[in-house]
Amino acid sequence: MSHCPYSPWNTRRFIVGVGLKSIPGQKIFLQDEEWAHYRGNKANVRNENLAKYYPANVGLTEQELSDSVACLRSIASQEGIAEATLLPSEVPFRDEFDKFCCSVQEDISIWKKEGEREWLAAIHLAAPNHWAPEDKIGKSFTDSHIPVPKIAPISQIAGKLFQQGLERGLQERLAWGVATDNRLNHHPSPPPGIMLEDWHGRSFDVEHPKLFARVERQTLFPVPGHSLLIFTIRTFFVDVATLPSVDKQQISQCMDSMDEDILRYKGLLLDKSPIQNWLQSYFNL
């Protein structure tokens, strides 16, 4: 399991907000000893059904896609990331964006703005967190985030945030929640041959408790010469049982601050009490 350098639960309160901060000079691609595991997951989803995880691009010209890939490759090269061209997969690369996305641990999307309209133009997502990329492609920020509780204030300034992204350069935000497994791929639809109840996850077993903090380090940066923003997601898992008591207490406090809508969206409505009891058994010692 990758070492996660982030602990967003130390706010002691679960916050739904923009949370973007400028990070000039920091790396975008965080490659570590778990690269083979992430690469294997990308191979698996491509062999299953590439279009399920990399749906057809919407409203993106060949030049825009080519320049986006050139931007990504330039950054990766500067950061010392060697592009892996030999993915253990029987599915040929659909295009150069597909090829690049399979050379890094991050998932990547491209957002486009034209006039007053902005939308998700391309997405390559091998580690979906209980949502389907094919349901989001071509939609605006507002429409693609309708299921997210407390998102309305952010949706109202989506256009402004896009413009700020073009002007401010590299920015970072953290998103997180708790999960009962550390599987990267949680597409809502299971692969063929796997029952939904076996695939779904989000079921805390009090007899054999396992809990992980799923942390997404997200970055946002512009493609030079275009009204395009590249958005990356690097997923980390942290085994909560291995955390110090103070961290467990902070996670518990964050869960206490979640209202019913957030708990339902996070799949925690039924599991909140048993998870809290399990956490408190540690820090009440």
Image (tube, rainbow, N blue to C red):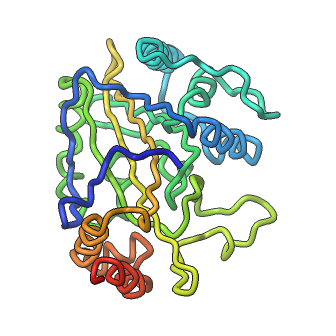
Query: Going by the image, does 274 lie left or right of 159?
Result: right
Query: Going by the image, does 202 lie left or right of 30?
Result: right
Q: Position of residue 82 (x, y in %)?
A: 56, 17
- Out of 285 and 207, give the one closest to the viewer: 285
Q: Position of residue 31 (x, y in %)?
A: 49, 31
Q: Quadrant of residue 118?
A: top left
Q: Is residue 97 above or below residue 42?
A: above
- Out of 43 and 155, give the one closest to the viewer: 43
Q: Quadrant of residue 11?
A: bottom left
Q: Position of residue 124 (x, y in %)?
A: 55, 38
Q: How many numbered discs sit on the rendered protein?
A: 0
Query: Going by the image, does 13 lie left or right of 70?
Result: left
- Out of 115 and 3, give the one closest to the viewer: 3
Q: Is residue 154 above or below residue 232?
A: below
Q: Is residue 58 above or below residue 152?
A: above
Residue under the image location 24 percent in, 35 percent down:
162
- Out of 229 and 100, give the one closest to the viewer: 100
Residue under the image location 34 percent in, 29 percent down:
229
Quarter of the figure that contains the C terminus:
bottom left
Residue under the image location 47 percent in, 13 percent down:
77
Q: Position of residue 108 (x, y in %)?
A: 47, 35
Query: Going by the image, does 254 lie left or right of 217?
Result: left
